[in-house]
Amino acid sequence: MRDDLVGLEISHQQLEELTNLPVHNELILITKSLKKLGKYLIEKMRGTEGATVVFIGCCTFVFAYLLFDIFLKIFIIKIPIPSGILLILFSVWMGGFIQTILYMIWKVKNNFLKSNMTNSLRILLNDVKRYNDVINAININDQIEEAGNLEVGIKQRKKVIAALNLTKSDLIRALKTERILRENKNFILSNSELFANNLATLTSMQVTEQATEHGRLLNEALQIALDVQHEMSRLHSQG
């Protein structure tokens, strides 16, 4: 990745910090992790470190077997099943137990995300994905250019990078605004008169910057505020 693209992408960690939500909550699968480990070990075994990997693997297995066997003999009454088979069964059970814990954690985070997901946040997350996709596309284009295809070079690259920097700033500001309004929604609803001036200011900013891409995400921040005001009016009418 070229230097002017480094740091432009909004990472998963940064996005979760900005939203204070597990927006990239993924279920960790033990089988998937084991496959990655297996592929890594096979690649190492095919290389110059093959003998070392086999030796360490055998030593690890023997040590685990001996430790498990000693544990059985000291703390558990004799069982007519070979300790090697018991070790395999215990490993399978432990894997299932850990996977169940990981699933429960994923489920709790997923429910928390759903309960706090707003329409504005959903739109912003989609905008972040599109923004990151643009950066990824530019990076791939740069690699194609470096491979010798000079005709695919991006014209006026500095202006494109400057526009991306502005877009990133707008996205971050909009995400921060959404989080503030979401986390203080109840207070805003009960004290709507205190925020009337802020809404008016945002509206005037929308008028002055409406024609520019730089103001597009600012308008999204305005829409978030207006959504809160609309919800407030709806709740007041119900009361």
Image (cartoon, rainbow, N blue to C red):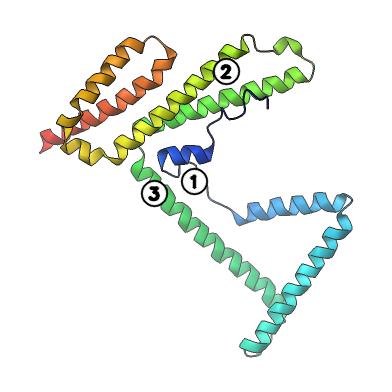
Which quarter of the image is occupied by the C terminus? top left
CB-based contact (under 8 Å), mark 3 and mark 2: no
Quarter of the image with the N terminus in it: top right
Could you say where residue 138 lies in the image, as x and y percent from the top left? 63, 21
Q: CA distance from mark 3 to mark 2?
A: 37 Å
Helix, strand or loop under label 2 = helix
Q: Is residue 197 visible?
A: yes
Neighbour class for label 1 at 10 Å: few (<14), some, many (≥20)?
some
24 shown above or below 229: below
Closer to the eye: label 3 or 2: 2
Q: Please report the residue visible at 40 percent of the width from the left and 21 percent of the height from the top.
A: 217
Of circles 2 and 1, the one toward us is 2
- In front of the other: 34 or 81: 34
Judge whether 93 appears above or below 204 on screen.
Answer: below
Q: Which residue is mark 3?
A: 111
Mark 3 neighbour density, 10 Å: few (under 14) some (14–19) many (20 or more): few
- With 70 as the anchor, is 41 left or right in this view? right
- Report if residue 123 is visible in the image: no
In this view, the residue in front, 150 or 180, is 180
* CB within 8 Å, label 3 to label 1: no
* 78 to 6, vertically: above or below: below
Mark 2 vs mark 1, CA separation in Å? 30 Å
Q: Amino acid at mark 3?
A: Asn
Dot 2 amino acid type: Ile
Pointer 1 residue? 25
Quick one: SS at disc 3? helix
Q: Earlier in the sequence, mark 3 or mark 2?
A: 3
Taking 56 as reference, is 201 left or right?
Answer: left
Q: Earlier in the sequence, mark 2 or mark 1?
A: 1
Q: In the visual, does 171 lie left or right of 37? A: left
The residue identified by callout 2 is 161
